[in-house]
Amino acid sequence: MTLANSSSNSEAIQKLQPTGWMKYISFSLDHKVIGLQYLVCGFIFYLIGGALAGAIRIELTTPISDFMPRDVYNQVLTLHGTIMIFLWIVPVVNGAFGNYLIPFYVGARDMAFPRLNAVAFWLIPPAGLMLISSYFITGAAESGWTAYPPLSITSPAAGQIIWIISVLLLGGSSIFGGINFIATILKLRQPNLKLMQLPMYCWAMLGTSILVVLSTPVLAGTLILLSFDIVAHTGFFNPSLGGNVIVYQHLFWFYSHPAVYIMVLPAFGLVSEILPVHCRKPLFGYTTMVYSIMAIVILGLVVWAHHMFTSGTPPWMRLFFTIATSFIAVPTGIKFFNWVATLWGGKISLNSAVLFSCGFIINFVLGGITGVALAQVPFDVHVHDTYFVVAHFHYIVYGGSVFVIFSSIYHWYPKFTGRMLNETLGRFHFLLTFIGFNLCFAPQHWLGLNGMPRRVAEYDPNFAFINQISSLGALLMAISTLPFLWNIIWSAFNGGIAGDNPWNALTPEWLTSSPPPIENWEGNAPLVTEPYGYGTINQEDLVEPTPESPSEESSQ
Amino acid sequence: MTTITPINEDSKQESTVIESHADHRMFGLAAFLIADGMTFAGFFAAYLTFRAVNPLPTNAIYELELLLPTINTALLLASSATFHKASKYLKQTKNGLCQRWLMITAVLGVAFLTSQMFEYFTLPFGLTDNIYASTFYALTGFHGLHVSLGTIMIFIVWWQSRNPGGRITIENQFPLEATELYWHFVDGIWVILFVILYLL
Ligand code: HEM
Ligand SMILES: [Cu+2]
């Protein structure tokens, strides 16, 4: 009886919903369907972006440009970066898990604006297809994911314009998503649920969404100006017409530094959900975690020029941005120590989810250390635009965010599908990924320190051996995808039945059937005020009185 | 100590209230306008930086006429006031008066757009002359786009608040309130733009 009137959208949702797998290719308004749409769509783009990365690594096994023409190399590099950032990591750590989990965590039956939510998702496939098809039709953009002018103004216009349109659409999608998350977390929260009782992922998504809303529009405006330079021959960023390329860099990094936090803050949140469950311990330092996230959000907005230390930045600016950037290490370090303290002395079950989370912690620390090093001007001027920077950000974006995505898939797959994943395959996947990843990117530090520039297809023959090791690592990473793919497909049909709560977790998404019913809970939404109460209270006491689905829903 | 309790009767009532969407939509719109405002902020920052670091040859600098933009500012400010009046009449269920003031607002918007067009055609520089010219057109054009959209929205809201038959009533004020918030936002941006582009 409460179901019917508790959501004004419920009827609309039910009416619009095709059943079975068809709902995943429909304009569904259900946040769980949309979340999985983001996840699967993102993963397909990940496979494409990964194939492009493979092509890059094949080209780089030899010091000469022999695998593909140079302009194709530039296009492949640009597509790789753009796809991985805008079509894989950003939509998945935000859109996929955010949509699936946030309504559960705030005790709501859907997002604040279900229709806007569906629109935000459906902007992504066309934008992605447009971007990729530009390679076949006009030739893709060639100026890297940063699209620095004057390069982006002088390279072939058609591909660049398509690139701009795609990124604008993806940025729009991201902004719509961000607005929705902020409204859902702040406005749809259960009345008795205090902000400081929310699972950490909510805080991470709140901070991330604030960054999205404040910074993405600046990128949009900048790209619009850039497109004027290309199409209408204005000279905003064209030095030969009196324009100023540095202004582009400032505006671009005003978005794109926060963008790195848009990629990694949600991952922080996800790890904070996964670790306590599998260590049977409360998340260490909840309050400091929250303040750290907010500190990162604020500081993250004022460090962008650390990407521009070699762009003739005046000394006072270098000083300011070095200091501000170094400060970010403080809240980041707090979070790191909190995760370690959460693990410390816990009853850790070393399953695939935990392995990937621990892999994240290790990789992220390495990436953070090189990050702080890069923030120091005297060091940065030597390694800027070398493979050292490539190594740094892959340690964070891949070793950090992508590891967390895998960890999250291992953790929430039982909830998504009602079936368990195969543990042996999962651990094998982790081992291959971890070794492959480090083999691929650790040597790149050395390459960069010794002066190998990034974004090149040809290099000094002295670097050949190390590049081959790196390519070997990339091969391992490619192979590591196979057990994972096999696992998620095979287990969807043959995995063991998961039951509602296979991990004995306390967060609200586990207090309902797997997969959850259309409005998340058959009865009332449970009020979970201690999402991390592990070990402090008797587990059985906690899990039993929860309102569960009366029907044993089995999945197909 | 139990941490997980089924939600009690009171909060169930409240949560039903919460999910009656109107105020969320205003909240969402406000967030969107912050985002939109950041786009303008980016443009303003670009323009100010250009001015600070990219000096133009003196013969390329034009003095902007102030008369027309000042009239434009007055038009927009007045339209914000008239819109406010319209929404006050709606709250008193005087739909006829509400509609009248909405129409006045829309006419002020159209007047602004016309006069802006007039300015465009009389200016001594074109889009690609130099980066000031380009930024000038980019900024005023992007703002003009907002005004055009807002004017269309006002016409729609005007039509919907007719009585009887209109969708907008005292119970359903959201479309009118949303348009009003948007319109005030566009006016506010204009004031900043006027100061930065014309007065500085
Ligand atoms: C611990 C805090 C961090 C610090 C101090 C830091 C510092 C830096 C610095 C100074 C650079 C510029 C290097 C150069 O181009 O010469 C840089 C580049 C980069 N960082 Fe970080 N970083 C940190 C965390 C992150 C995170 C969390 C991410 C992503 C999730 C990230 C992603 C990137 C990317 C993508 C680039 C290269 C951008 C490009 O030029 O294409 N960084 N970082
Ligand atoms: Cu940065």
Image: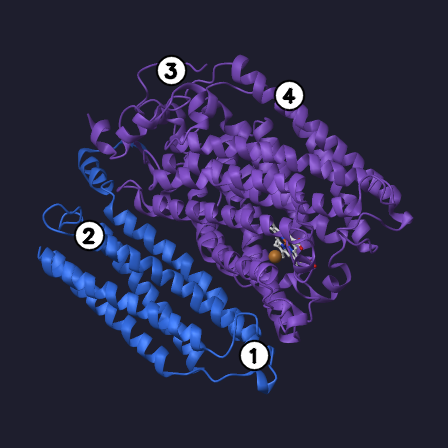
Chain colours: A purple, B blue
| Residue A415 visible in the current orientation | yes
Question: Dot 1: what SS?
Answer: helix
Give the numbered dot on residue B52.
Answer: 1
Give the numbered dot on residue A553.
Answer: 3
Q: Quadrant of residue B180?
A: bottom left
Mark 1 CB within 8 Å of ligand 2: no
Residue indicated by mark 4: A425
Where is residue B116 drawn, in percent x and y?
37, 71
Packing grade of label 4 (10 A; few <14, some 14-19, many >=20) is some
In the rendered structure, are the residues bearing label 3 and label 4 in contact, judged by CB atoms less than 8 Å apart? no
Vertical order, A502 against B8 (above or below): above
Among all residues in the image, which is located at the extreme right?
A: A462
Query: How far is disc 4 from disc 2 in space, using C-alphas?
Result: 63 Å
Question: Dot 2: what SS?
Answer: helix
Ligand 1 visible in quadrant: bottom right
Which amino acid is tagged 1?
Ala
Query: How far is disc 2 from disc 3 in space, using C-alphas?
Result: 50 Å
Where is residue B107 drawn, in percent x and y?
24, 66
| Residue A291 visible in the current orientation | no
Q: Is residue A301 left or right of residue A385?
A: left
Which amino acid is tagged 2?
Trp
Where is residue A397 drawn, in percent x and y?
62, 45
Query: How far is disc 1 from disc 2 in space, using C-alphas?
Result: 47 Å
Which amino acid is tagged 3?
Glu
Residue indicated by mark 2: B159
Whichever of callouts 3 and 4 sits on the residue coming sooner in the sequence is: 4
Mark 4 CB within 8 Å of ligand 1: no
Residue at 56% in and 20% down: A421
Q: Is residue B79 left or right of residue B124?
A: left
Of residues B10 and B42, the one nearer the viewer is B42
Query: How far is disc 3 from disc 4 in space, using C-alphas?
Result: 27 Å
Which amino acid is tagged 4?
Leu
